[in-house]
């Protein structure tokens, strides 16, 4: 200040031209914008943008667009009615090209601070911004900022939604998805998402016409166009000689293994990264770029992986590290899985190809893909976590890779068929569709096929069932003859007490007695001093009906204990009380006791065993009938012979 002979040093500061908006003052060597500096800058810029010189106004708007991101400056500029000034400049329609672009940029930056309510925006301003979006030949920078402003209006004000919806329709926005500019496509999709999310319930539904059906049709068209945008990427091969593309792969390695380390000097160190690329799960450890040369999925797979690594970094690092550190050959190769998953999503299940082939008359769409600006990438992130979970549930190895992908394909197809309305709902569907549930559904569907519902098959099943039930009954009784050890209920002494119960080999007497410790094998009948004749057993009760559970009701018995309790009632004043060590023993004993009393075995274990054994027996008996149509009715009985006087002449 003294060097340039300026008075009032507190009114001046030096600002860094590049990088963050930092200042040097007489008092502080490096600081953010102070209120005094902000107020002075705001007043100067406000005067300059209202000047008559076009060049001076343009330079002032450029400066304003840059400074508007600073919250201190924004507060001062807004206090001077700067927002109203910018709005009037837009409404006047006298600004074009760069001048208008910088005006809209500054306006959006200032409004994003949340100091001024969006509800104060005038209808004429909305009409002017909407006009830029609807114009066929408008500057790209103006269109981009106009779309962003309209999106913010819709998201931040319920009243402005209705005004914007009157000026802009989804059908008009779809045209902006057919341009080659990716930023315009992104902003257009974001505005469509905002319009759909803020729409009243009657406009979101798609069952009635005219408004609802029109919205459904527009969203369907949008989904097809979104596919076209992704299709271009998935059909682009990776160029192994392209350094920029190879740097993306290096970034995946850095995020997984180096954290925030500097990526400089990577070229000379790439030789030592082969091990890391192997741990990342790439097929080609020396040059992973070769894994992305096949289309599909092409570069789309790499885009998905980078999105996961940057936007869901914790998930990405967890998946990579928990598999790369395993030594049991059950590691899930992240790179190979991500590439194959992207290929699978491109080739078969929704959302990409579902509804894309209009020749098949499919007009379906998935609302879930309109709830996020990067819905496709988020969908991939959810699916790769599902794949990793399924891999662990299947205890898969590298040889099982194709089997795992088949299961994941089925999980995704089944989940999307339920039409989840959001990504969170999709995650819930995936949690329910575990590997064991997929196996159960497959078994159920096989049994419900037409062949298994034909009368001959049903009749065969009915004939087999008594045999299988008798087999299960014998198994239960044999287990009772082996006996089981039970803990003494209510024993609180340090040394636990046990008792043992087993059925006699002729199935007529139950022998039981106390033990000092848990037995390691079969307990001889001689050590079991007490016995109950089976003929004296009146009934078997379970759960809350057990006498020992009623007696202990004041103690608020643990639910698990209640589910494992059963009692034998054999005398008006006598009973034998059990608490099984686990659910399996509980089912064995309750089934066996019911079998002794001639009652139905109704446990979950019996139902499961019955289904499994009947299914196995049916498959064995029908093994020779593969590809043979089973008739619905038995063949007709032939006519009787004309005479029964026939013999065979052995001579």
Image (cartoon, rainbow, N blue to C red):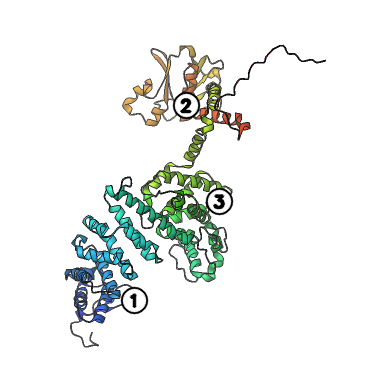
Q: Which mark is residue 327?
A: 3
Q: Which residue in the structure is indicated by mark 1?
A: 18
Residue 100 in picture, x, y percent from top left = 27, 72
Q: Nearer the viewer, residue 281 or 411?
A: 411
Residue 85 in picture, x, y percent from top left = 19, 71
Element type at marker 1? loop
Q: Nearer the viewer, residue 118 or 251?
A: 118
Category of crowding for the residue at label 2, using alpha-carbon neighbours closer than 10 angstroms: few (below 14), some (14–19), many (at least 20): many
Element type at marker 3? loop
Element type at marker 2? helix
Q: Which quadrant holds the N terminus?
A: bottom left
- Where is residue 161, by image quadrant? bottom left
Q: Which quadrant holds the C terminus?
A: top right
Residue 154 in picture, x, y percent from top left = 26, 58
- Image: 505 above or below 232: above
Q: Nearer the viewer, residue 162 or 87?
A: 162
Front position among marks 3 and 1: 1
Whether residue 315 sits left or right of residue 136 in the image: it is right
Of all residues, the one furthest to the front in this rendering is: 642
Q: Confirm whether residue 362 shows in the render.
A: yes
Q: Which mark is residue 587?
A: 2
Q: CA distance from mark 3 to mark 1?
A: 50 Å
User: Who comes first in sequence, dot 2 or dot 1?
Assistant: 1
Whether residue 91 sits left or right of residue 416 in the image: it is left
Q: Confirm whether residue 492 shows in the render.
A: no
User: Who comes first in sequence, dot 3 or dot 1?
Assistant: 1
Total numbered labels placed on residues in the image: 3
Residue at 31% x, 49% y: name it.
212
Residue 87 in picture, x, y percent from top left = 21, 68
Q: CA distance from mark 2 to mark 3?
A: 38 Å
User: Who comes first in sequence, dot 2 or dot 3?
Assistant: 3
Front position among marks 2 and 3: 2
């Amino acid at each position: 200040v003294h060097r340039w002979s300026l008075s009032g040093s507190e009114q001046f500061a030096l600002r860094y031209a590049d990088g963050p908006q930092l200042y040097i003052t007489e008092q502080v060597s490096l600081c953010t914008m102070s209120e005094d500096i902000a107020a002075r800058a705001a007043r100067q810029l406000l005067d300059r943008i209202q000047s008559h010189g076009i060049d001076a106004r343009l330079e002032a708007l450029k400066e304003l667009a840059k400074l508007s991101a600073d919250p201190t400056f924004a507060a001062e500029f807004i206090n001077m009615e700067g927002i109203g000034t910018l709005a009037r400049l837009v409404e006047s329609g006298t600004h074009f090209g760069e001048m208008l672009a910088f005006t809209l940029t500054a306006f959006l930056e200032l409004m994003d601070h949340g100091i001024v309510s969006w509800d104060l925006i005038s209808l004429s301003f909305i009409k002017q911004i909407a006009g830029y979006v609807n114009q066929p030949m408008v500057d790209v920078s103006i269109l981009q900022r106009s779309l962003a402003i309209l999106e913010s209006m819709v998201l931040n004000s319920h009243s402005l939604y209705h005004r914007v919806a009157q000026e802009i329709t989804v059908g008009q926005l779809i045209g902006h998805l057919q341009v080659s500019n990716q930023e315009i496509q992104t902003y257009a999709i974001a505005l469509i998402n905002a319009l759909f999310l803020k729409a009243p319930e009657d406009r979101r539904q798609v069952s009635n016409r005219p408004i609802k059906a029109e919205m459904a049709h527009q969203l369907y068209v949008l989904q097809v166009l979104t596919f076209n945008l992704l299709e271009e990427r998935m059909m682009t091969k990776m160029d192994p000689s392209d350094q920029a593309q190879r740097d993306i792969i290096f970034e995946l390695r850095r995020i997984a293994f180096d954290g925030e380390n500097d990526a400089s000097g990577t070229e000379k160190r790439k030789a030592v990264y082969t091990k890391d690329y192997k741990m990342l799960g790439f097929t080609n450890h020396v040059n992973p770029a070769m894994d992305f040369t096949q289309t599909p999925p092409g570069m789309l797979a790499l885009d998905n992986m980078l999105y996961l690594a940057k936007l869901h970094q914790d998930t990405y690092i967890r998946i990579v590290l928990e598999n790369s550190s395993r030594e049991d050959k059950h590691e899930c190769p992240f790179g190979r899985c991500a590439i194959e998953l992207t290929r699978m999503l491109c080739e078969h299940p929704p959302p990409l190809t579902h509804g894309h082939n209009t020749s098949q008359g499919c007009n379906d769409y998935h609302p879930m893909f309109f709830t996020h600006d990067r819905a496709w990438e988020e969908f991939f992130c959810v699916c790769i976590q599902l794949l990793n979970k399924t891999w662990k549930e299947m205890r898969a190895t590298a040889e099982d890779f194709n089997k795992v992908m088949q299961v994941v394909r089925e999980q995704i197809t089944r989940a999307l068929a339920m039409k989840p309305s959001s990504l969170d709902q999709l995650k819930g569907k995936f949690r329910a569709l575990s590997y064991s549930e997929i196996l159960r559904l497959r078994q159920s569907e096989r049994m419900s096929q037409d062949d298994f519902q034909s009368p001959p098959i049903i009749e065969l099943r009915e004939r087999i069932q008594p045999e299988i039930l008798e087999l299960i009954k014998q198994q239960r009784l044999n287990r009772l003859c082996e006996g089981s050890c039970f803990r003494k209920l209510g024993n609180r002494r340090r040394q636990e007490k046990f008792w043992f119960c087993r059925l006699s080999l002729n199935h007529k007497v139950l022998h039981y007695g106390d033990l000092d410790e848990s037995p390691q094998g079969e307990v001889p009948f001689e050590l079991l001093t007490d016995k109950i004749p089976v003929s004296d057993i009146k009934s078997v009760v379970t759960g809350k009906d057990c006498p020992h559970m009623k007696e202990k009701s004041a103690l608020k018995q643990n639910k698990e204990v209640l589910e494992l309790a059963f009692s034998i009632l054999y005398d008006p004043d006598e009973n034998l009380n059990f608490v099984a060590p686990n659910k399996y023993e509980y089912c064995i004993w309750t089934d066996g006791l019911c079998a002794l009393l001639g009652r139905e075995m109704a446990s979950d274990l019996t139902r499961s065993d019955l289904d499994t054994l009947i299914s196995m027996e049916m498959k064995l008996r029908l093994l020779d009938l593969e590809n043979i149509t089973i008739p619905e009715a038995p063949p007709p009985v032939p006519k009787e012979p004309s005479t029964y006087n026939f013999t065979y002449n052995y001579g």
